[in-house]
Each structure stands twice: as structure tokens, then as C-alpha cells.
Image (cartoon, rainbow, N blue to C red):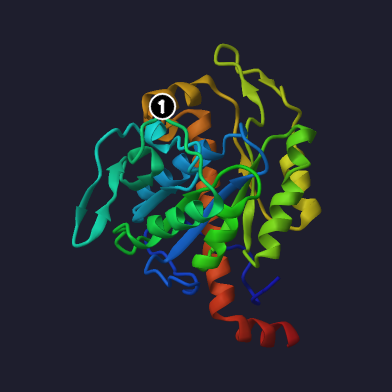
Amino acid sequence: MLTLPGVERVDIRMGANVTAGARGGRLNLPMKNVVAVASGKGGLGKSTVAVNFAVALAQAGASVGLMDADVYGPNIPIMMGVRRVLKAANKKIVPLEAHGVRLMSMGFLVDSEKPLVWRSPMLHSTIRQFLSDVDWGGVDYLVVDLPPGTSDVQLTLAQLVALTGAIIVTTPHPVALSDVRKGVAAFQQLEVPIIGVVENMSLYICPQCGHEAHIFAHGGGRQAAEQYGVPFLGEIPLDPSVREGGDLGQPVIVAAPDSPMAQALRRVAEAAAQRISVLNYEQANQGLIQIMEIL
């Protein structure tokens, strides 16, 4: 922990002056930060967190892209309410846009009723094309919604670009938490920093009386983060409006900006953005930090 004499408190606000992470990987792309959103299993709300995280960043003034890397189950077009056809310009695919976020998904390219039956080389090629053949325009953040679990997509992404970090989404109950360790370990093995853990479906708040019910237990996400030595980004309550908004293509942070759900998601986005800034600072000033720690 770094300290300065006389400084008792530091307040950080998320804004559009976004610092850049390290460039690298095989593609060396121009976007400032590439952030992966992952979960140990399906059904934990990973895409919901990715969508609202991206929109929250855009609402704060940052330029944001959202890449749907869940090739077999692309949900981003539905959740962002986009059905238009892709176009090309200057030999690049022009990403679609909704709620201030640029979008790319396999859902824009194939019939939603037809399953994809692909081997790993096809996945690798698709992720590479989504990164290099789409005109992302050097966004401040490229948020990547990963498929659940640990798969070839995570490995391909880490090989192709220098990820700023990964956000791990979980729920409080023990079955989900058992997979947090696998997700954290997988990214650490790939030398990808962990931005933090998000606990989704943390509690249910009754809209009539305001009573809080811990349907799936409570606090497991924070405990897992502490156990594995990574930051805890926050808790997101369970709310039917999330499902309704996702079905209608209206993220809750847009449809109900003053709701407890939207406020919680916005706090998570702010915490993640602050953590990204710290990671970028530490990376850029690693030598100086080592000297200060010695002193």
C-alpha cells in the first residue's frame, strides 16, 4: 500500500480521461483497454454485467465497444436490442451501435435458429476477426463477453491481445463459488490481472415493502475475493426488471436508471474503472513503485 504524508483520503471519480493499458499480443490493437468479463458457469448473469458495464462506461463519457465472444450462445444482440445487418467500409466491418456502445456478435452473422458446430480452429479465427477486422476505432474500453467456464476462447483472447484484466462474475451460493477459483486460476495462469469479483443475484429487495431476502445466500462473492486475494467490486441485487430489460433490448441501467439494480451496476462499473486505472498506473510505473516500496 502506497501512502503520502498528510494525505488522509483520496476520492476517485470515473470519467472520460481514460488511461491506457499495455499494448501487445499478436495483434497489438489500438484500443486503450481490453476487459474480459467471465464466469465459471452459465446462468450467473455474466452477459448482464458485461452489457450494463459497457453502457455505464459509455454514459460516463468513455468510448466503448462490446464484443460478444460467446460464439455458441450470442445473447448481446437481444440484450442490446439490435437486429440490423452489418456493413463494411474501408475493408473493415462497421460495428453496430446501441445505447452509445459499439457492438460485434456472431448473432449478427448467422441465423439465430441455427446452431454452430465448430472445432477450435474456427473459434480462434472468429475471435481474431472480431478483434482485427472490425473498425472499433481505438475505443477507450473494449469489453469482451466471454463464454462461461474456461475454454479455447479465453486462451485465444489472451494470446492475441494484452488484456488489461478480467472481471469474474459469480452468485453467492457455494456451487457457483466453487468455480470462482478455477476462473481466477485460469487467468492468473495466462498472466491476466484480475480486476475483481462481482456477486450477482446477491439479494432480493421486495418492491412493495423493501424487505431484503438472501435467496442464494449472501456474501460469498466477497469471501471468495478475499480468499483468492483479488478485489471485490460489489453486489448486484436480483430483480425481475433485469430479465424484462434483457428481453426488450433495454439494459436496466438505461430503462430504470434510478433503480437499486441500476445503482448497484453503476457502482460496480465505477469500482472496475478505478481498478483499471490503478492497474495501468502500476504497470506504467512499476520501477518507481518498487523503489518507493524499498524506501
121 shown above or below 200? below
Q: Which residue is mark 1?
A: 113
Left or right of 222 on screen, residue 124: left
Count of numbered tags: 1
**Residue 194 image-quadrant placement:** bottom right
Q: Which is nearer the eye, 199 or 188? A: 188
| Residue 256 spot, x, y in % from top left | 41, 28
| Residue 128 spot, x, y in % from top left | 43, 60
Asked if residue 11 shows in the view, the reply is no
104 shown above or below 44? below
Q: Residue furthest left?
A: 89
**Kind of element beneath mark 1:** loop
Which residue corresponds to the image point at 64% horizontal and 53% vertical from the top-left? 196
**Residue 189 image-quadrant placement:** bottom right
Quarter of the picture holding the C terminus: bottom right
| Residue 174 spot, x, y in % from top left | 79, 34
Mark 1 neighbour density, 10 Å: few (under 14) some (14–19) many (20 or more): few
Which residue corresponds to the image point at 66% horizontal and 31% vertical from the top-left? 202
294 shown above or below 173? below
Q: Which is nearer the eye, 215 or 79? A: 79
Left or right of 207 on screen, residue 211: right
Tag 1: amino acid? Glu
Left or right of 216 on screen, residue 286: left
Q: Which is nearer the eye, 148 or 53? A: 148
Quarter of the picture holding the N terminus: bottom right
Q: Which is nearer the eye, 189 or 267? A: 189
Which residue corresponds to the image point at 56% horizontal and 44% vertical from the top-left? 147
288 shown above or below 205? below
